[in-house]
Image (cartoon, rainbow, N blue to C red):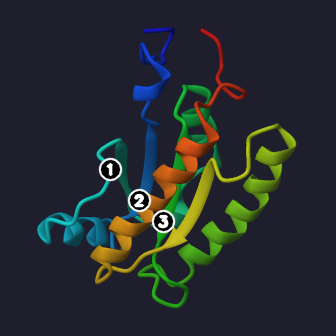
Amino acid sequence: MEGNRIVSKEKSEWKPRIIAFLCNWCSYAGADLAGIGRLQYPPNVRIIRVPCSGRINPYFIIKSLQHGVDGVLVSGCHPGDCHYISGNLVARRRFAILKRILEFAGVEKGRVQFTWISAAEGERFSQVIKEVTQEIKALGPNKRFVKEA
């Protein structure tokens, strides 16, 4: 263990640590449907359920990266389907700005991702998690943005 970060002994066994902030009403329900349907997806994703993707403070994403998380996924309801009317549109605007700030700070493109998943898309949730995990694995461990203890 190195600071707040767990380090594997061999690079070949390295698995990315990913945090997924999921909207309670759609994306989290999609994850639940994937679980009920016994759909397979990588187990290295930790899910944090939030009331709405519009309630995710960009600070949460930045702090996750600083603490050694290798990737972050933010997922909300499809546009027009938000239970809080326009929360997902607020999230989309915040994410667009945060993405540019992170790129300016040297965080690789693709380390933080945003997607729409509805409650009926369990299979899509499984596929998105697989794709995000592959992309983060290709980027390698998050070393540039980790805050040293």
Tell me the residue that label 2 is attached to.
129
Q: How far, Cα to Cα, is label 1 from label 3?
A: 17 Å
Q: Which mark is residue 42?
A: 1
Residue 82: x and y in percent read 46, 82
Q: Is residue 132 placed above or below 5 in the rendered structure?
A: below
Marks 2/1 in contact by CB < 8 Å: the verdict is: yes
Q: For the point 35% across and 50% down, which residue is it?
A: 47
Q: Residue at position x 45%, y 43% from top?
A: 18
Residue bearing mark 3: 75
Quarter-wise, where is residue 127 in the image? bottom left
Which of 60/75 is in front?
75
**CA–CA distance in space, label 2 to label 1:** 7 Å
Q: Label 3's element?
A: strand
The one nearer the camera, 149 or 15, is 15
Q: If you read the primary sequence from the N terminus, does the residue marked by circle 2 or circle 1 appear first?
A: 1
Q: Residue at x 37, y 75 (%)?
A: 124
**Above or below: residue 25 compared with residue 112:** below
Residue lying furthest front: 12
* Label 2: how many Cα within 10 Å (few below 14, some 14–19, many 20+): many
Q: Residue at coordinates 18% horizontally, 63% vertically from top-left?
A: 35
Count of marks overlaid on the render:
3
Q: Amino acid at mark 3?
A: Ser
